[in-house]
Image: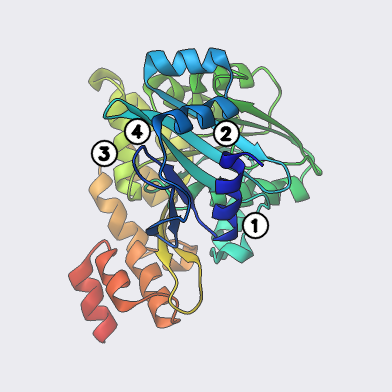
Amino acid sequence: MSQLNDILRTAIQNKASDVHMNVGLPPLFRVHTVLKASDFPIMTSEGILRILKEMINEKRIAAFEDLRDSDFSYEIPGVGRFRVNAHYQRNTIALSFRTINDKVRHIEELFLPDIVNKLTYLPRGLVLLTGATGCGKSTTLAAMIDAINKREFCHIITIEDPIEYAFLSNKCTIEQREIGSDCPSFASGLRHALRQDPDVIFVGEMRDLETTSAAITAAETGHLVFSTLHTNNAPQTIERIIDIYPSDQQNQIRSMLANTLQAVISQTLFRRTDQPGMIPALEIMLCTPAVRNCIRENRIFEIANVIETSRALGMQTLDSSIKQLYVNGHVSRDDAVSMAAHPEKLERALVA
């Protein structure tokens, strides 16, 4: 067995979410948010280069040397799949691995509210999952796509960098395209996807103007589009999308976004105190007429109040979700308060 596979197999056995390889240190495992040194030997420059060459071909090695960064996926059959980033730090190669669960988990297994499943029944529109890196966006979206796959007869196209969960077509026909090997960019893959008769499109990330514009156009033309952004809440997400556009186009994009956006789910991941593992807290914004008017009329600051007062419709604030996790004994008080949107307000609510 190669050193690489030995390290990654051990990481899976230890339930590590991430593995870091740096010159001068042993491989590091992140287990339930805590980074720990493994028992493997200290990594050398030669050893890390050898590991990199096990995973990608000479062409991609050359591109990596030129760009100094590379994203790709790696699989050990029967063990698991990994999202990999190779990069340089202090003029040496470093590797970061994110473990990807072979098994797509059900929405119910992830402790997600019922409204998340209801969003998979939408016929069209844009649904965004947001949050920091490592907050479980990919896992939640995989569960949503899997729910459609088990229920509907339709065509799903995913555009990812790299492919994370490998889906097996069930009732749906699923095509997965990876940036770099199957298509050159998100924007290109999305633009061509519109000519491939999709019903559902998953875009790994809306990172630039061209991709964002293509995703909104796809939603506007009758497709259900899922994507992600690295934002913390719904108002920030909407502002980020609008700010991508030049100022002379922002009124037009507000109108388009008001018409196409269906929901924003902002996710934060907590370490559980009742058992080993992680559990999500979610802010959920649904595009009701009130929310659409706020977007169209540039009153984004009012959206937080709409979410707060629309619980009966399935919306919820992050802090209300965190409070429920604490009341149910899933998370610690310190974690609940420290990760709240309004820590002092939540602390008072927990006392009450």
Which residue is farthest bottom? 352
At mark 1, the secondary structure is loop
Disc sitting over residue 241 in the figure: 4
Disc 4 residue type? Ile
Amino acid beneath label 2: Ser
The mark lying in front, picked from 2 and 3, is: 2
Q: Can you see residue 221? A: no
Label 2 to label 1: alpha-carbon separation: 20 Å
Q: Residues within 10 Å of mark 2 (few under 14, many from 20)?
A: many
N-terminal label among 1 and 3: 1
The amino acid on which the numbered mark 1 sits, given as a three-letter code, is Arg
Q: CA distance from mark 4 to mark 3?
A: 13 Å
The quadrant where residue 324 appears: bottom left
Sequence-first disc among 4 and 2: 2
180 or 292: nearer the eye?
180
Nearer the N terminus, badge 2 or badge 3?
2
